[in-house]
Image: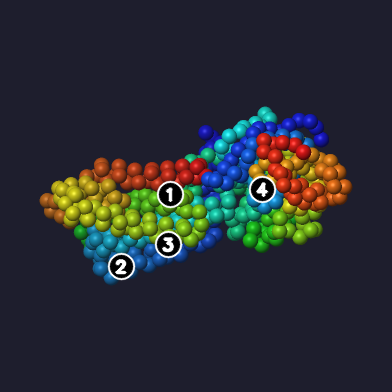
Amino acid sequence: MTDDVALTATDLRRSYGDVTALDGVSIDVPTDSVTALIGPNGSGKTTLLEVLLGIERPDAGTVDYAESDAGRRVGYLPQRPTFRPDDTVRETIAFYAALVEDDPDRLLERVGLDTVPDRRVSALSGGMTRLLGIAQALAGDPPILALDEPASGLDPAVSDRIFGVVDSLAADGRAVLLTSHALSLVERTADHVVVVEAGGVAARGSPAALCERTGGPLHETFVDLLSEPTAAVGGGGES
Amino acid sequence: MTRQLDRFWTVFAREVRGLVRTRVVFVLGAVVAALAFGVARAGGGPSGGYVTTVVDLLVVVELLVPAAAFAIGYRALADATARGEPAVLETYPLSPWTYVAGVYAGRAVALLAVVVVPLLALGAHVATTAGPETTVLATHRGVDSVALYVRFVALTALLGLVTLAVALALSAVANSRRRAILLGLFGLLLVVAGTDVTVLTALGGGLLDESALGTVLALTPSGAYRGLVFEHVLSVAFEGRSGFVPTGIALVASLCWWASGLSLAALWAGFR
């Protein structure tokens, strides 16, 4: 892990009508590490991720990326990656690889799908589809990977494998930014945790530092933080 | 520029592969061939020559080709949106224009195969069954020729390509398969009848002068197609009569429908 920062977001604000999704969030995403955004449903995690990716435009605030000569700036795994069901695994990844002149076989090998290149996407399990999504996110070797709920809806063994892959991606020198409700896996894998609540940052720190608040697992700290009446701190405040 | 061209071919190849795999092209091609041959033979056109075959086909083709274009195009972008693909593609150096152009070109190749191949096969059938007065080139009015039939096929292909662009625009706006079906049906009605009905209603209501009817009808996709077929294919059968539609206006109007459809699709894809 280094102190280099891949992405800096400052005072992000985003509203949908009367609903405030982001209320002055500031965040740094370091390289060589996994940064996890955790929070209850509807807290603004996915909106924050999409604004950081550039898919959503903030109403105010800035997102700055470190210089990079990679084929693309950010790789993105959506919450439910869906591909053309009739295409094979290799055809699917070859499409994305061709857009950034990458090697599809390298990408499949990286996530362990090189053993099933001819399998139709419709015949893949949920975990394999997620791995295919991660392979897609890796195309063009982007310095930042944004993974939205990479293990949601998967059984524990597959979730464990997905987080193993995520961990190894950060070890390759990337900045991995993910959202997740799998707090035990986040506690084990993430280097930095940002607790998002009501569009603001309620707390941030390493999993160990956050766990010190209650002395229990991250899950306990999470519940404890959210039970506080003024949990969310707009403007990216720390706690 | 070269890289965008490479990406265009990547998108194009995926579209063609997907259409071939779903077999929709083969089914549509068989339907178009069966209807074209069936209608032409029922009308006795092939034994009379190319022009009589075109007379038999014109109304059917005017409905069939837009229907085929919408069948091939109505889900082209809506399916991708339903899969969440635009958000992923936004992280790639792929412009919405390149993406839409690749999707359109892939679908256009499929549409041309569906429409042009059966019509050319029918033309070959006419060549073997028509009487001796049918020639290769029409040297004067009243003479039938294969060149007239080739013009008809080319104009029909133009109608298909214009309609496909409209279908793609509506597919871009739809964000689910259900909405894509509804918008597709709306678009088909618009192209096949809606624009003509609007013009004729305006004429009936006194909003439009009768002398301008040909020009205004040339502004609609099907009106332009019909007018151009009359002007450049069937006119040999109308002694002393021409000027069914202003050719330049009909072609420019078709180009505008085509360009507007693709531009709307690309702008919408970029907007999301």
The residue that disc 1 covers is B169
The residue under the point 72% across, 36% down is A237
Query: Residue B29 got which mark?
Result: 3
Q: Amino acid at mark 3?
A: Gly
Which sits earlier in the primary sequence, circle 3 or circle 2? 3
Q: Amino acid at mark 4?
A: Ser
Q: Is residue B58 above or below residue A139?
A: below
- What is the chain letter for disc 2? B
Crowding near the residue tagged with mark 2, few <14, some 14–19, many ≥20 C-alpha atoms within 10 Å: some
For the residues bearing labels 3 and 2, Cβ distance under 8 angstroms: no
Considering the numbered disc 2 on the image, is that residue within a helix, a strand or a loop? Answer: helix
Q: CA distance from mark 1 to mark 4?
A: 35 Å
Query: Residue A43 got which mark?
Result: 4
Pinpoint residue A211: horizontal percent, then vertical percent.
84, 45
Q: Of B65 and B235, which appears nearest the observer? A: B65
Which sits earlier in the primary sequence, circle 3 or circle 1? 3
The residue under the point 23% across, 48% down is B216
Say yes or no: labels 3 and 2 on the same chain. Answer: yes
